[in-house]
């Protein structure tokens, strides 16, 4: 079965066409920096590799461009839309409605739309992907794989907020957790590599960032909560912030609730600290001596180290930390900042190994490091394809 995977992030779209259950990748691609004039589009097959830089203003335009490449008479990989048996969509927020992979219906789309208030940078983009895919690949099964599913194992003492109980029982206000397909995939690879069921922390660093404490293969705590807005400093999201700041902005500074929401989600994080939302730009500027960029990187790493300490306590030990996703896999400087002065936790980074760029799983800690440091490239597309195939087979 040919399964097309669409992973619409807050500022990017990854797509991959696979044959299941053989796991053969027919083509893969990415549309990066959506909304900027310098959007980057890649399309790779066994015989072709295309890269273009052009403005992609919206997710819809990006998905239409990806479909054009798939169907291109010369360099495409399918001759007809009907060759696609299923389209698997990553969906960030499933709330309390979805704890498993689900075939998409109109009712499912309504729930995803309803949950857009909790994931405003993601769920709307997912809906666009679903609607465009339904138009283009009308004969294919459309399937949703939810980021929140992996975190259903977080125990109540970690997923319940200290607020009136009716907000949980009636309004389902609780910790849900996100980036679940990525954390699940890399944690399973880490356990295979370590050859034991371990106490590990997975660190997913991209435009959106999160960390998960994983014990015996199960998520027990996570930096994001009710929505993918809190925790680490992100590209445009503030992460953790004292809630009284929100009330101060509304009551004393005259902002509306919607304005505050927009500031915290779309105008904060690394963008507010540096003027750039992409870490590649920030690292480049920091190397040139830009003090704002230097400080932002230090702040980012400090926040990550705080959660490492917190989760080491929650796990009552630590066997390994795992770096993954665009920044985690590719930024040796960010990994170095995170692992500096962490010897109390048994984390000792090998500087030479840390500089190696590879698409393979690799250990970048010193041989005598008590806590292993691994870089594991995430493969959310494979994880989604596998879950879609299993659902349809069953």
Image (spheres, rainbow, N blue to C red):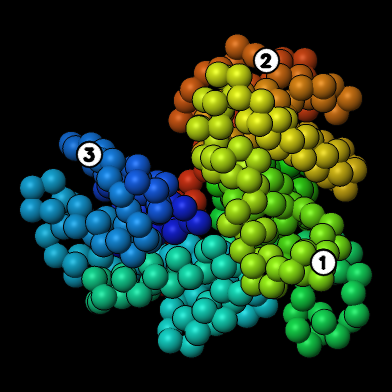
Crowding near the residue tagged with mark 2, few <14, some 14–19, many ≥20 C-alpha atoms within 10 Å: some
- What residue is at 64 percent from the left and 72 percent from the top? 258
- What residue is at 71 percent from the left and 19 percent from the top? 349
Residue lying farthest to the top in this orientation: 352
Whether label 2 touches label 3, CB < 8 Å: no
Crowding near the residue tagged with mark 1, few <14, some 14–19, many ≥20 C-alpha atoms within 10 Å: few
Q: Where is residue 354 in the image (x, y as percent from the top left)?
A: 60, 19
Q: Give SS at disc 3.
A: strand
First in sequence: mark 2 vs mark 3: 3
Q: Where is residue 282 in the image (x, y as percent from the top left)?
A: 56, 32
Residue 247: quadrant of the picture: bottom right
In the image, which is nearer the foreground, mark 1 or mark 2? 1
Question: Is 248 situated above or below 346?
Answer: below
Residue lying farthest to the left in this orientation: 73
Between the residue at mark 3 and the residue at mark 1, the CA separation in whole angstroms equals 52 Å
Q: Mark 1 points at which residue?
A: 252
Residue 155: quadrant of the picture: bottom right
Frontmost residue, 272 versus 51? 272
- Please state the total of marks drawn on the protein image: 3
| Horizontal side of residue 56 vs 171, given as left or right | left
- What residue is at 66 percent from the left and 31 percent from the top? 292
| Horizontal side of residue 114 vs 212, given as left or right | left
First in sequence: mark 1 vs mark 2: 1
Work out whether residue 156 can be spotted.
Answer: no
In the image, which is nearer the foreground, mark 3 or mark 1? 1
Frontmost residue, 301 versus 261? 261
Crowding near the residue tagged with mark 3, few <14, some 14–19, many ≥20 C-alpha atoms within 10 Å: few
In the image, which is nearer the foreground, mark 2 or mark 3? 3
Quarter of the image containing the N terminus?
Answer: bottom left
Between the residue at mark 1 and the residue at mark 2, the CA separation in whole angstroms equals 49 Å
Report the disc number at residue 350: 2
Q: Mark 3 points at which residue?
A: 50
């Amino acid at each position: 079965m040919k399964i097309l995977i669409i992973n619409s992030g807050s500022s990017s779209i990854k797509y991959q066409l696979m044959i299941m259950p053989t796991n053969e990748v027919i083509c893969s691609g990415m549309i990066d920096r959506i909304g900027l004039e310098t959007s980057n589009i890649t399309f790779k097959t066994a015989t072709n590799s295309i890269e273009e830089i052009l403005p992609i203003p919206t997710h819809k335009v990006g998905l239409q461009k990806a479909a054009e490449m798939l169907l291109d008479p010369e360099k495409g990989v399918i001759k007809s839309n009907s060759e696609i048996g299923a389209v698997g969509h990553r969906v960030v927020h499933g709330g309390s409605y979805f704890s498993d992979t689900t075939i998409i219906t109109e009712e499912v789309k309504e729930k995803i739309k309803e949950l857009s208030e909790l994931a405003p940078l993601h769920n709307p983009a997912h809906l666009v992907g679903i609607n465009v895919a339904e138009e283009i690949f009308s004969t294919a099964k459309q399937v949703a794989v939810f980021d929140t599913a992996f975190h259903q194992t977080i125990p109540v003492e970690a997923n319940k907020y200290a607020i009136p109980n009716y907000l949980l029982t009636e309004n389902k206000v609780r910790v849900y957790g996100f980036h679940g397909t990525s954390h699940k995939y890399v944690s399973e690879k880490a356990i295979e590599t370590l050859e034991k069921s371990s106490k590990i922390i997975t660190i997913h660093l991209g435009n959106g960032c999160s960390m998960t404490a994983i014990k015996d293969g199960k998520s027990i705590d996570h930096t994001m909560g009710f929505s993918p807005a809190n925790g680490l400093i992100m590209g445009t999201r503030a992460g953790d912030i004292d809630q009284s700041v929100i009330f101060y902005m509304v009551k004393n500074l005259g902002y509306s609730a919607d304005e505050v929401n927009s500031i915290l989600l779309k105008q904060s994080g690394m963008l507010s600290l540096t003027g750039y939302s992409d870490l590649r730009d920030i690292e480049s500027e920091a190397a040139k001596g830009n003090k704002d960029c230097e400080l932002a990187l230090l702040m980012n790493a400090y926040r990550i180290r705080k959660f490492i300490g917190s989760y080491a306590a929650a796990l009552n030990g630590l066997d390994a930390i795992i770096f993954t996703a665009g920044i985690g896999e590719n930024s040796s400087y960010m990994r170095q900042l995170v692992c500096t002065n962490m010897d109390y936790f048994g984390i000792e980074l090998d500087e030479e190994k840390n500089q190696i760029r590879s698409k393979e799983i690799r250990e970048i800690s010193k041989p005598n490091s008590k806590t292993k440091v691994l870089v594991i490239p995430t493969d959310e597309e494979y994880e989604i394809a596998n879950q879609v195939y299993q659902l349809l087979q069953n």
